Image (cartoon, rainbow, N blue to C red):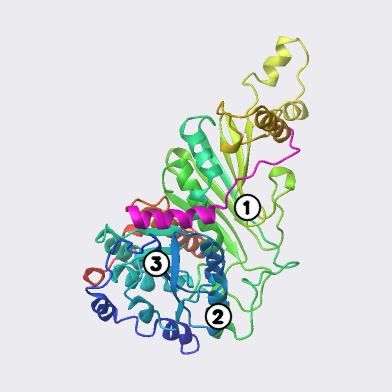
Amino acid sequence: MSQETDFSRRDLLKTVGAVTAVAAAIEGGPAIQKVKAANDQVQYGMIGTGSRGTYLLKHLKNIPTGRCMALCDIQQVALDRGVQTIGNNPATYKDYHDLLNRKDLDAVFVITPLYVHYPLTRDALLSGRHVFCEKCLVFKPDEVHELRALSESRPKQVMQTGLQRRYSQFYQMVKGMVDKGVLGNVHHIHAQWHRNMINKPSRLWTMKPGGPSNPDNWRLYRQFSGGLTAELTSHQVDIADWMFGSEPEFVMGLGSLDMLKDGRDVYDNIQLIYGYPNGQKLTYSSISTNQFLPYFDGTRPEMGEIIMGTDGTIEITVGDDVHMPVAWWYREPPKTSTVEKANAKQQPFVAGATMVASGGANGPIPLMTGDLTFDGKESFLEREVKYARRWLYSKGVLVQEESRNPVDVELESFFQNCRDGGRPRANLEVGLADTVAVILSNQAMDEGRKVYFSEMDKMGVAPDMHRTS
């Protein structure tokens, strides 16, 4: 790393090589400790209180099963914002080692720039804490192997990845439909996350003065960031892995920097194709010049997935804090073809428009969450309200939305797993598979070739792995 950009690793990590000293300082402390607070709260610290960290703190402050004890960030303004957001006057630190040296932490959140996820997660695990790390778990191939080895050597510690779609009621419902064959043979998934950075620049993706020397610009440079693939694609390729029940075999794609030529070196638009076993495919698009989403009659922007099976299709999006997750189900038309119908009625068959016009008559059917199911215990009024709402949803007058934000659910689930030792839905292997997809997708675009996922087995493998044990 050049001297110009040495600021971030020097200031954020400081003595990152002194892992042994950190572990020794914690020896005899809270290693893999059970929650001992009288009110059964998980006591946690957070490393990184920038935009994402502050966003999570807004949700964490309303979750009673956790209590924030300490915050850490190298920027004072971010640290102050984090304290103000959580509102319970936690201790504050500039050096994350000081946070890890506390004796009262059960868990640590790692919400920092991607390129330092691994060293901070490693040190938090070595200190004996449960860890929640935002996606992607690591940045480089060697870190994939090292984190797996370290985490597997500490099976009593919870390791959760920030992939909130796995905690959505709608996404879980769709996964059940896929597994039960309701959609038939699910062979294709398309996903997009489109943003208009020309007419509506995002503060997270807009170049600020200072170039690489400004920590706020870390997403815009390859030495710190995985670009759109890490920030956006990672969420959606994880959905494809989940729905298909396997990881990709190869990826190919095209990425370029066409519009946002302000000094950044990450792509501003990407198109990717992932090949899965049995010929299943995910096609993916992320552009920076238009935010239109051609699902849900164009009523939602930016991101969503369409899951296509031989018997039906699902449109689904996780939404945001304003627009909650929603899913629409389209059934495939009857298997009798237009040709067969024309022959049966002895009418001339007209190709093209006739086939299209007769094709998609079934749907959409909004998926219903539990609050609209009938359990037989409803009063007359409650039953009539449910019937009315179901009818309005079926006509598209109302849109059925998820009752809770999946971010809240994933955070509550993390605290629950810290208490009961349960396995997270977005566990270590889910997070590492997602990370591998990001690394290899960028490689495929950079090298202009089909990259096989088996290549990761030999990438970044050092002859001596003892330093993670």
Residue at image coords 33%, 67%: 129
What is the spatial separation of the Cα atoms under label 2 and label 1, in whole angstroms?
A: 29 Å
Counting residues from the N terminus, which is met first, the one under dot 2 or under dot 3?
3
Numbered badge on residue 43: 3
Q: Give yes or no for residue 203 being in the magenta stretch.
A: no
Q: What is the CA distance from the residue labelled 3 to the residue labelled 1? A: 30 Å
Instruction: Say if 79 sits above or below 160 in the image.
Output: below
Q: Amino acid at mark 2?
A: Asp
Residue wearing tag 1 = 319
Q: Position of residue 152 (x, y in %)?
A: 27, 58
Question: Which quarter of the image is occupied by the C terminus?
Answer: bottom left
Q: Which residues are magenta?
A: 395-420
Q: Secondary structure at mark 2?
A: helix
- Please report the residue visible at 52 percent of the width from the left and 79 percent of the height from the top: 79
Compare residues 220 and 366 and report the one nearer the observer.
Answer: 366
Tell me the kind of residue under disc 1: Gly
Residue 80's tag is 2
Q: Tell me what residue is drawn at x 23 percent, y 78 percent.
A: 24
Q: x%, y% of residue 330?
A: 64, 33
In the rendered image, the quadrant that contains the N terminus is: bottom left
* Between discs 2 and 1, the one toward the N terminus: 2
Badge 1 crowding class, 10 Å Cα cut-off, few under 14, some 14 to 19, many 20 or more, is many
Task: Give yes or no for contact between labels 2 and 1 (Cβ–Cβ under 8 Å).
Answer: no
